[in-house]
Image (cartoon, rainbow, N blue to C red):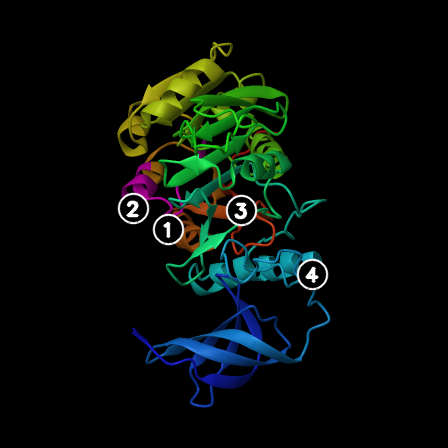
Amino acid sequence: MVDQPRVPLELQLTGFAAGGKAIAHAPDGRVVFVEFGIPGERVIAEITKQDTSYIEATVVAVLEASPFRVEAPCAAFGRCGGCQLQHIDYGEQLRLKTEVVRDQLRRIGRFEGAPIREMIGQTDPWGYRNHMRFTVRRDGDIGFMEHGSHRFLRIDRCEIAHPKVNEVLRNAQGRTMQTTALSVRVGERTGDLLVQPKLRWRPGHPGGHVSSGQTTYTEVLAGQRYRISSPAFFQVNTRQAERMAEIVVARVTEARPRLVVDAYGGVGTFAALLAPRVPEVVTIEWAAAAGDDAEVNLADSPNVRRVVGSVEDCLPELEPAPEVIIVDPPRAGLTPTVVQTILDSAVRRIVYVSCDPATLARDLRLLVDGGFALREVQPLDMFPHTQHIECVTTLDREPPQIAR
């Protein structure tokens, strides 16, 4: 891959790809991935990178606009890189993202006619993000690194951030010292804040309105209270996380299992919600911080057993054998060893929570080839105005063995 001069191309945009980029074809036949375009548009785009088989480019002028093109409300859109889709009407974002899931399952997973439902969108797709990480300069300015460069971009307000995140940003902007990063986490249902690190204030610039240095915060999801430590993972969109949890719980409980495994159990998010609904839950988690939180969050759930370790080591040792497993792996998806461990188990239903359709498609092909049937893929828009896509997928051992 070699950086090229910014050469303009006139392009007809014909499709949409993973990563939030429109698709076109150059005069020499190469595929062009175009930032900030919309299928159906004719644009002038500048080449940013070239390879022997494809080109990357960015829209610099729109000659024929899509009816779905809208004015992005954020002044930093296109520069900060956090959002890729603010220029597209939200309903059209949902349709295009659903098509990305369909395309990835077809191309990578080789699934024709996969049972993919329409994406579940968000009623208000702004002000949702409850966790933000910022860069801090020596002069105290707070912001992000510009998209595709090492230049600093000061940010005074983020349109997708929760209002309390923007409040911290406003009160800390230009006032901090002796830190290079700022992490802000908000409990949307509780009002709790976790601001790291413990901030020091520049002389003459007190930041008395910002409490910082907390090590944990609390959030409520579907009526269940959770403690979350600074290093532990928790969903950045509480409203959509509740909808996702509802789907996961429904898909698990309709199988009427006696024992459910919550693999990659984290802080106990799914286990705590399932505990009142199934006889027994086992969580598997190796991360110490998440495990400490789970111990607190599951203290009132005597039918939940916590196991520390990896899925491939712990799942075969469980007695009795679980009927249902929830997997919520990192973006890289399941390792081949974990896939084989599940195939070798007595599990008859898998509920797979994924944040990357490409690795999901890869893993689903392995699981289906190993004897599972793909029942449903439900995309959710956990990250409006960005390229990211979450899916909850349900698979049953073939033939289905669901109790009715």
- According to the image, label 4 marks what residue? 89
The answer to whether residue 328 of the structure is visible from this angle is no
Question: In what element is the residue under mark 3?
Answer: strand
**Which three-letter amino acid code belongs to the residue tagged 1?**
Leu
**Which three-letter amino acid code belongs to the residue tagged 2?**
Pro
Extreme residue in the bottom direction: 27
The magenta stretch is 324-341
- Cα distance in 3D space between marks 3 and 1: 17 Å
Q: Position of residue 136 (x, y in %)?
A: 42, 43
Q: Indicate which label's residue lies in the foreground, 3 or 2.
A: 3
Residue 207 is one of the magenta-drawn residues: no
**Which three-letter amino acid code belongs to the residue tagged 3?**
Cys
**Sequence-earlier tag: 1 or 4:** 4
Which mark is drawn over residue 336?
2
The image shows residue 188, relative to residue 129, as above or below, that is: above
Q: Position of residue 60 (x, y in %)?
A: 55, 76
Q: Indicate which label's residue lies in the foreground, 3 or 1.
A: 3
Question: In what element is the residue under mark 1?
Answer: helix
Q: Is residue 125 left or right of residue 214?
A: right
Question: In what element is the residue under mark 4?
Answer: loop
- Cα distance in 3D space between marks 1 and 4: 36 Å
Pointer 1 with pointer 2, Cβ within 8 A: yes
Pointer 4 with pointer 3, Cβ within 8 A: no
Q: Residues within 10 Å of mark 3 (few under 14, many from 20)?
A: many
- According to the image, label 3 marks what residue? 391
